[in-house]
Image (cartoon, helix red, strand yellow):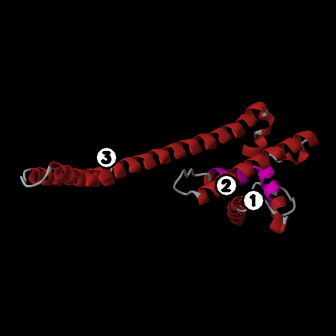
C-alpha cells in the first residue's frame, strides 16, 4: 500500500470513529425528536460518505492510468514487432541496418525497399519520441540507445535522415535529428563510408 493510500485510509478511519462517537453522543440526547435525530445522523455520516467517494474516485483514476499505460505499451510493442517482422519477411535487408552494409549498390527495387524500411523506422522513432515528450509519465521507454545504434550501423538510416535535413523547414524528423546530430558530432555515423558526400 502506498503512503498516500495509507494516509487516506487513516483519515477515513479517524473520521469514521469521530462521526460514530458524535452520533452516539447526540443520539443519547433525550430532547431531540426522531426527525432531528435522523437529520443529525445524516449530517454525521456525510463526511464518511465524502471520504469514501473521494477514495473511490482516486481508485478509478489510478485504474484508468494503469489501463492507459497498458494500452500504450501494447501499441508501442505492436509497432516494434511490425518493424522486426520486416526483417523476417526480408532477411536480406537486415545487414543494411545492423551490420553496416551500404545499400547504395543494391539493385533499385531492393534499394528502394531498404530505404522504405529506413523511413518506417524513422517514422516510428519520431512518433515515439514525440509521444514521450507530450506524455512523459504515461509510458517512457528508452529508445535513444536503439536509435543511436542504428545511426552507427545503418547507412540507409543515415542517408534518409541526411536527405530529410536538407529539406530545411519542411523536414519530417526533428527529435530523431537531434540524436543523429549527437552521433554525427561523435564521428560515429555509419555513412558516409569511403568518400560519400557528407550528410
Position of 29 relative to 74 (above/below): below
In primary-sequence order, the first of circles 3 and 2 is 3
Read off the residue under disc 2. Answer: 148
As helix, strand or loop, the secondary structure at mark 1 comes to loop
Q: CA distance from mark 1 to mark 2?
A: 15 Å
Tag 1 near tag 3, CB within 8 Å: no
Residue found at x 88% / y 44%: 112
Residue found at x 77% / y 31%: 89
Indicate the quadrant containing the C terminus: top left, top right, bottom left or bottom right: bottom right
Query: Residue 77, how many percent across, how many down?
Result: 62, 40
Query: Residue 64, how many percent across, how many down?
Result: 49, 46
Q: CA distance from mark 3 to mark 2?
A: 39 Å
Numbered disc in front, either 1 or 3: 3
Q: Give the extent of the magenta segment.
A: 146-162
Foreground pick, 173 / 105: 173
Read off the residue under disc 1. Answer: 173
Read off the residue under disc 3. Answer: 1
Q: Main secondary structure of the magenta part?
A: helix
* Residue 126 seen in render: yes
How would you rate the neighbour count of disc 2 (Cα within 10 Å): few for under 14, some for 14-19, many for 20 or more?
some
Residue found at x 19% / y 54%: 40
Tag 1 near tag 2, CB within 8 Å: no
Foreground pick, 156 / 27: 27
Q: Is residue 107 left or right of residue 70?
A: right
**Residue sitting farthest toward the right:** 108
Q: Is residue 73 left or right of residue 124?
A: left
Amino acid at each position: 500500500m502506498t503512503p498516500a493510500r495509507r494516509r487516506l485510509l487513516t483519515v477515513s478511519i479517524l473520521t469514521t470513529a469521530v462521526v460514530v462517537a458524535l452520533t452516539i453522543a447526540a443520539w443519547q440526547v433525550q430532547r431531540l425528536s426522531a426527525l432531528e435525530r435522523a437529520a443529525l445522523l445524516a449530517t454525521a455520516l456525510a463526511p464518511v460518505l465524502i471520504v469514501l467517494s473521494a477514495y473511490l474516485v482516486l481508485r478509478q483514476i489510478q485504474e484508468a492510468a494503469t489501463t492507459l499505460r497498458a494500452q500504450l505499451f501494447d501499441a508501442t510493442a505492436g509497432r516494434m514487432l511490425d518493424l522486426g517482422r520486416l526483417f523476417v519477411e526480408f532477411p536480406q535487408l537486415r545487414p543494411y541496418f545492423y551490420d553496416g552494409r551500404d545499400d547504395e549498390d543494391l539493385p533499385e527495387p531492393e534499394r528502394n525497399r531498404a530505404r522504405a524500411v529506413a523511413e518506417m523506422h524513422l517514422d516510428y522513432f519520431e512518433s515515439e519520441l514525440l509521444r514521450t515528450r507530450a506524455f512523459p509519465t504515461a509510458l517512457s521507454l528508452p529508445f535513444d540507445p536503439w536509435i543511436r545504434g542504428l545511426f552507427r550501423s545503418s547507412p540507409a538510416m543515415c542517408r534518409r535522415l541526411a536527405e530529410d535535413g536538407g529539406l530545411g523547414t519542411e523536414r519530417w524528423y526533428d527529435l530523431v535529428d537531434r540524436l543523429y546530430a549527437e552521433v554525427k558530432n561523435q564521428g560515429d555515423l555509419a555513412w558516409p563510408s569511403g568518400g560519400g558526400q557528407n550528410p
